Image: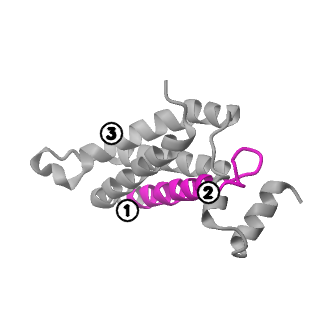
């Protein structure tokens, strides 16, 4: 059994302290993830965040609701982000042996799904919340895994 799998198995069974399991969370180069982020996630998330920010009911009189094309674009962006989140949970792409990686990938999937549901329901409040949750997830993951320049 590979060492990482052994540690995870022991951690799940309570045989390894959480401090030992946490040592598995460490950044390393991930070319495929970098390509996915640059080719899909950057644009989809930026567009979703911009539309959600405009539609946020907290804007009051300055709120700008998407038209039918805008809601469809939000749904498309959310679907793309969810697809990438699922890809990040794949052993071919992601660091499935790292607890933090999987927590963040699942959170990205959940927030993307919430954004998709908000777009389908044309619910600006739910969209704003989903976008905030997604942004928090991105920040938490990048704090560990994205090299800062």
Identify residue for label 2.
Answer: 22
Write down the region rendered in magenta: 89-118
Q: Earlier in the sequence, mark 2 or mark 1?
A: 2
Q: Are marks 2 and 1 in contact (CB under 8 Å)?
A: no
Instruction: Classify mark 2: helix, strand or loop.
Output: helix
How far separated are the C-alphas under marks 2 and 1? 39 Å
What percent of the width, then of the height, locates residue 6?
Answer: 81, 62
Quadrant containing the N terminus is bottom right
Looking at the image, which is closer to me, 110 or 123? 110
Establish if 45 lies above or below 148.
below
Is the residue 2 above or below the residue 40 in the image? below
Numbered label tally: 3
Q: Determine the residue positioned at 46% across, 48% down.
A: 140
Image coordinates of residue 60 in percent, x first then y, are: 12, 51
- Residue at 25%, 43% in the rendered image: 54
Badge nearest the viewer, 3 or 1: 3
- Judged left or right of residue 37, residue 11 is right
Magenta segment includes 111: yes
Look at the numbered disc 1 and give the secondary structure of its residue: helix
Task: Specify the farthest residue to the top.
Answer: 149
**Marks 3 and 2 in Cβ contact (< 8 Å):** no
In the picture of the structure, the residue carrying the numbered disc 3 is 50
Q: Nearer the viewer, mark 3 or mark 2?
A: 2
Q: Earlier in the sequence, mark 3 or mark 2?
A: 2
Q: Give the residue at mark 1.
A: 121
């Amino acid at each position: 059994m590979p060492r990482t799998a052994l540690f995870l198995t022991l951690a799940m069974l309570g045989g390894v302290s959480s401090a030992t399991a946490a040592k598995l969370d460490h950044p390393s180069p991930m070319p495929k993830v970098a390509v996915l982020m640059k080719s899909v996630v950057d644009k989809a998330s930026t567009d979703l965040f911009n539309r959600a920010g405009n539609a946020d009911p907290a804007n009051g009189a300055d709120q700008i609701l998407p038209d039918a094309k805008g809601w469809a674009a939000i749904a498309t962006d959310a679907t793309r982000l969810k697809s990438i989140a699922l890809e990040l949970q794949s052993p071919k792409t992601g660091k499935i042996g790292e607890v933090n990686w999987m927590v963040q990938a699942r959170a990205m999937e959940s927030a993307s799904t919430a954004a998709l549901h908000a777009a389908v329901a044309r619910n600006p409040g739910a969209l704003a919340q989903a976008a905030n949750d997604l942004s928090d997830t991105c920040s938490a993951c990048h704090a560990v895994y994205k090299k800062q320049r």
